[in-house]
Amino acid sequence: MQRIRLNERDVAEAVETAREFMRTHTISRASWWLSERSTPADVEERLLACGLTIVEGDHLIDGMLLTSRPPPGPAGVVARPVVTADEHVAAILAQYEAFGTPAERRRDAAALAREFDRERQADVVATFAAWLEGRVVGAGRAIFTPRGALLAGGSTIHDARGRGVYRTLVRARWDAAVARSTPALAVQAGAMSAPILRRLGFEKVCQFRRLQDVASP
């Protein structure tokens, strides 16, 4: 839920509308992204009163922007868009490992393969994987727009960190955006990724406050 501009009397109704959508589509959790432009002024307090929660360590998120070429990754790391269902599955499994995704929130290989087929039918979203010594050790997505690419899910498995995998994934997605004549990257960065992105040239342009809503059993 983004670009939240509500009247005071509409907050509770908006929450219920979102929850009805979650029930209809069997969605277990939703993120509400607030900024200094969200309305009403006390919208965060009103959403918390409706049952949304703050996730410790995942509340304040920097909105960051890059409009100049980032440095390349090291020679031993290769990053590119996935081209097969098996590569897509391996990339998402690497994200699960990197983020410590609980077992109950992990999709099986068949569901991930179907996701790959859906992505191939459009020219908007691409999943990138990073290989080190012949295995997939990191992944990230790019959502392409007429103004640039939005990065999401950039991650590196624990035993491959510190070897330039994340940096290589950023550069690969920059090159993809340049190829589309939209040389800009935007990202919503938490405490773990923001310092790395600053070193790569990203600048903070705003800050989000993320709230989470979890569906009732």
Image: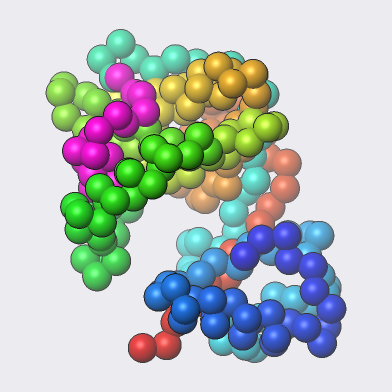
Location of the C terminus by quadrant is bottom left
Residue range corresponding to the magenta coloring = 78-95
The answer to whether any part of residue 161 appears in the image is: no
Q: Residue at x 54, y 46 (%)?
A: 189
Give the quadrant of residue 199: top right
- Please give the name of the residue rendered at 84% of the width and 78% of the height, measured from the top-left corner: 7
Image x and y of residue 125, in percent: 48, 39
Q: Is residue 155 visible?
A: yes
Q: Is residue 181 magenta?
A: no
Place of residue 27 in the rendered image (x, y in percent of width and height, measured from the top left):
43, 72
Residue, x 25% and y 56% (percent of image)?
Answer: 111
Q: Quadrant of residue 136?
A: top left
The residue most toward the front is 121
Above or below for 203 versus 68: below
- Secondary structure mainly formed by the magenta segment: helix
39 shown above or below 109:
below
Total residue callouts = 0
Q: Residue at x 34, y 37 (%)?
A: 139
Residue 196: give x, y in percent of width and height. Answer: 49, 34
Q: Picture coordinates of residue 156 (x, y %)?
A: 31, 38
